[in-house]
Each structure stands twice: as structure tokens, then as C-alpha cells.
Image (cartoon, rainbow, N blue to C red):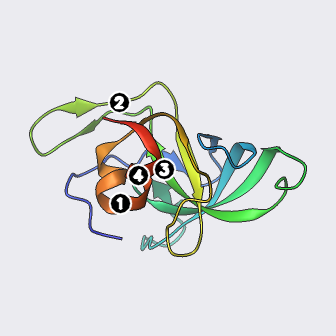
Amino acid sequence: MKAVRASITKSLNQSSYLTCADNTGAKIVQIISVGGYKGVRRRMPKAGVGNLIRVAVKQGDVKIRHQISHAVIIRQKAEYRRKDGMHVSFEDNAAILVDDRGEPKGTEVKGPVAKEAVERFSTIGKISSIVV
């Protein structure tokens, strides 16, 4: 896991729902906690593109439902700015399930993946079809 170069707007609160964009069987996941978040007392943790989070699977295959897993956010609706001055936003908020080391559990990703997530977790780029 590498450092993120862009200053990404963290727009996803704890307990937000995301679509799962891989083929693990999960459809909708909920953010439980944000990894590496160091904030002020009583402030809700927030996450953005490229963050490693803990999620609970809310909808999906019977085998994977109600399980807690790690995930990486690959898309967010809120606009964020890249170092080159370009503003990026996506249609939805999406994440993919990963294991403890950041390796994806699925074998393919549906839809585009943000470049910041691929820079941080290079194995995500190997299974994604479009990197924006």
C-alpha cells in the first residue's frame, strides 16, 4: 500500500452504503470503520477513493451475507481534485472486497476504477478493465 498523491475529498461517512463492484457475490456493503483514521474526539470517520475500510455485507449471496471484510473504495460521487488540476467524479460510490494484505478477493471489477486506488493498490489494476 502506497501513499496517495492527490488530496482526495473524503466524502463517505461511517455507516454509508456502497455498491460492491466485483464478482465476490456481495451486492451492497456498509462502511463500519476507516483504516488509519486519526481524527478528533466524537468526529465521524470519513473515507475517500483509495482508502482501506472495514465493511459489513448487507445484500448479496447467502454465503457472504452478514460477514465483515476489508474493502477498498474505487469510486465516489463527490468531486475531488487531482494534482494536475483535473476534477474527477463518478456516477456512484463503489468498493471492492480485499483480504488483509489488500489483495482483491474477486477476479474482475465492473465499471471504471479511479487511478488513485490503482496507484495505492497495484493488484486492483490487474483485474480492472478501465482505469480513469
Look at discs 1 and 2 and give the one toward the viewer: 1
Q: Secondary structure at mark 2?
A: loop
The crowding category of the residue bearing disc 4, from other C-alpha atoms within 10 Å (few below 14, some 14 to 19, many at least 20), is: few
Rounded to the nearest whole Å, what is the CA distance between mark 4 and mark 3?
16 Å
Give amino acid for label 3.
Ile
**Residue receiving disc 4:** 126
- In the rendered structure, the answer to whether residue 71 lies left or right of residue 61 reads left
Q: Secondary structure at mark 3?
A: strand
**Residue receiving disc 2:** 89
Q: Marks 2 and 1: in contact by CB < 8 Å?
A: no
Give amino acid for label 4.
Lys
Rounded to the nearest whole Å, what is the CA distance between mark 4 and mark 2?
22 Å
Give amino acid for label 1.
Ser
Of label 1 and label 2, which has the lower sequence position? 2
Q: Residue at x 57, y 75 (%)?
A: 100
Q: Residue at x 51, y 29 (%)?
A: 92
Look at discs 4 and 3 and give the one toward the viewer: 4
Q: Which mark is residue 122?
A: 1
Give amino acid for label 2.
Ser
Q: Marks 2 and 3: in contact by CB < 8 Å?
A: no
Q: Is residue 61 above or below residue 93?
A: below
Q: Nearer the viewer, residue 48 or 70?
A: 70
**Residue receiving disc 3:** 73
Q: Is residue 110 above or below residue 3?
A: above
Q: Secondary structure at mark 4?
A: helix
